[in-house]
Image (cartoon, rainbow, N blue to C red):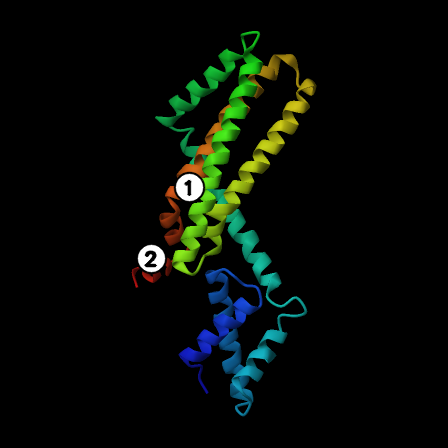
Amino acid sequence: MELTQTHIEELYKFTRIHFVEHYDIQTELVDHLANDIEQIWAKQPSISFEEARDTSFQKFGVFGFMEVVEAKQKQLGRRYAKILWRFLKEWFSMPKLILTGLLFCFFYGLLDFKTGLDFLFVILLLLGIIDGVLAARLWRKAKKRFIEKERKYLLEEIIFRTGIFNLILLFTNFLQFIIHIKYIPAVLEKWVFAGLFTVAILFSYIVLIVIPKRAEELLEETYPEYKQMNTL
């Protein structure tokens, strides 16, 4: 026996019932289940599709598809980190390096004034407010995007949602660092502060603006079938 299109659709539904919400992981699991079911049928042609499906599913163990999902999350998380690093490196090459250097020099020079540190904290506060507004807009855009497309890829969600949480984590660690600034030698304080503020601004811009704008390109790079699916 061979699987029909109806069977394939049932397998997609089966993965969704078992808490697999991303289309790329669903497709990977459906391919695996379909091949396994056909092998089961080759040995036991009399059993039903549902019985073969459940037999195949039992091979995933007590936690079902969760281990596969977690493995894919780690894999795509590493890919997102590489994407982030790729765009960040662009700011340390000409001509963007000049802008990066000017930004660093601005923060470094600001610290020469007695009230320079206070200004930096004000800048940090303003940056946090701006990032909050951008993050909220990105969150709404993600929600609308997923509803309209009726499917979402794991990397797609990382780009539009996880990036926001990475930003929150960055500022949390940034504030923790400020609290412990007294442990840094005085001769390095200005360099460290200027560097941190520069990286924080670049990171915010890349995570909340650059990468989401390049989402389609990045998804096509990761999923060869993505462009074809969107043209149907």
Q: Residue at x 59, y 37 (%)?
A: 169
Of residues 219 and 162, the one nearer the viewer is 162
Which disc is residue 211 wearing? 1
Which disc is residue 222 wearing? none
The image quarter in which residue 205 lies: top left
Give amino acid for label 1.
Ile
Residue at disc 1, secondary structure:
helix
The quarter of the rendered structure image containing the C terminus is bottom left
Q: CA distance from mark 1 to mark 2?
A: 18 Å
Q: Earlier in the sequence, mark 1 or mark 2?
A: 1
Q: Is residue 64 visible?
A: yes
Tell me: residue 209, above or below residue 94: below
Q: Is residue 203 visible?
A: no
Q: Residue at x 40, y 38 (%)?
A: 210
Dot 1 alpha-carbon crowd within 10 angstroms: few under 14, some 14 to 19, many 20 or more: many
Residue 219: x %, y % from top left: 40, 52
Residue 121: x %, y % from top left: 56, 20
Dot 2 alpha-carbon crowd within 10 angstroms: few under 14, some 14 to 19, many 20 or more: some
Answer left or right for 132 relative to 231. right
Q: Residue at x 62, y 74 (%)?
A: 59
Give amino acid for label 2.
Lys
The image quarter in which residue 168 lies: top right
Tell me: residue 224, above or below residue 62: above
Answer left or right for 53 relative to 95. right
Residue at disc 2, secondary structure:
helix
Which disc is residue 227 wearing? 2
